[in-house]
Image (cartoon, rainbow, N blue to C red):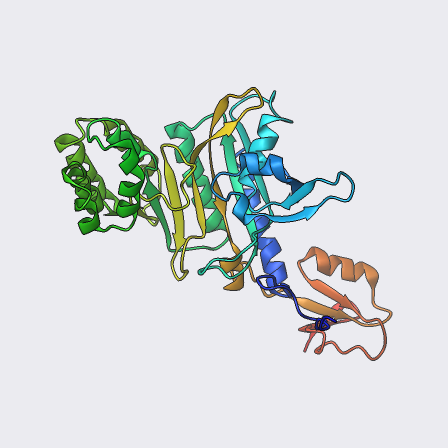
Amino acid sequence: MTDAIAPGLLPEGLADRLPPRAEASARLVRDVLDTVASHGYRRVMPALAEFEETLVDRLQSAGAQDLLRAIDPVSQRSLAIRPDMTAQVGRIAATRMAATPRPLRLCYGGPVMKLRADQLRPERERTQLGAEIIGSDSVAAAAEIVNVAIEALQRAGVRGITIDFTLPDLVPMLAAGPMPVEPDQVEELRARLDAKDAGAIAALGPHALPYLALVEATGPFHPAMERLEAIDAAAAAGTLAGRISALRAIAKPIGWDITLTLDPTERHGFEYQSWFGFSIFAEGFIGEIGRGGSYAVARTDGGRESAIGFSLYPDPLIDAGFGTQAARRIFLPLGHDGARAAELRGEGWVTVAALSGADDAAALGCEAVLDGKGIRRL
């Protein structure tokens, strides 16, 4: 016999969001998506669950280990609840919108579910918002994506934003060219660069020593870029000139109030990105609140299509009170003037109508009462 579950108990990592946080969540989502839409991105709403096999084929960073599964009673096939919406947008672009002219700008927002939580984020159900450009991963597309993400967060009230740039393919590109490394050692080198462990990098042998300079090319954007240029001149034989030029072009239109940093070898969370990636941080919050970069979408004909985008995970912002606004609430007594109540709603008031003579305006959170056609403050 199993123990009875308490009526209010939810599974680990899941939680209800109550007023005013629920209203704040809806408002923040609307602000972000309205901002993105104003730049020409059209909204799509992918299904909450898909057949496991088709979802796994497109998941790259998340992977099958993140999937919460169930058996579809209709098809008797395994279903999976999405842990990430970017893969679904890629599916939509490659199938239902395959004939739509490129570049194709799409945006989305909704819940995602992970099988397990991580140390920084104990919640398993999260809100994901984002935008994708399908059909281009050019420097112009990258600059647009970064600046749209910043504008959307600023409209939602976020300040103290930091953008950390990375070059996910940097080490493999150098290892196959001017700074050669044996193919079977590239992954180990990348892991040690991720850890910023100079001793461990040097221990790989003389061929790894030139990569120690990349550890120093990390930090505030402009000094780090100068160090990256020095590496390009000394060891990379000009191989990085295109990447350096692209990063400077992406950074140029970003406002002075945004902090820019560079970590050229960072790859955590960028396993499926191609030449460019970025993380978004906000003052007062631990860990990333968003991430983006360039990648490839698999087409149904077996080819691949360039793309670039970003995803935001705003739950920490919502829980901290972003988007929360104190609504003006006015109590409508029995027999109130309906036309006057409609006028008040048009002026921004939230009206709370009495359902019985026992209803109390103050207990219902109202700051005023409709008195005839006038307003009486409590």
Nearer to the camera, 260 or 355 = 260
67 vs 378, left or right, is left
Q: State which quarter of the image contains the N terminus.
A: bottom right
Where is residue 228, by image quadrant? Answer: top left
Q: Is residue 11 visible?
A: yes
Q: Can you say whether 346 is above or below 293 in the image?
A: below
43 vs 36, left or right, is right
Number of numbered discs overlaid on the protein picture: 0
In the rendered image, the residue lying farthest to the front is: 1
Residue shown at 60%/61% (left/top)? 14
Where is residue 91, by image quadrant? Answer: top right
Percent x, y of residue 314 = 51, 54
Q: State which quarter of the image contains the C terminus.
A: bottom right
96 vs 310, left or right, is right
Q: Can you say whether 241 is above or below 206 in the image?
A: above
Residue shown at 51%/29% (left/top)? 297
Nearer to the camera, 273 or 130 = 273
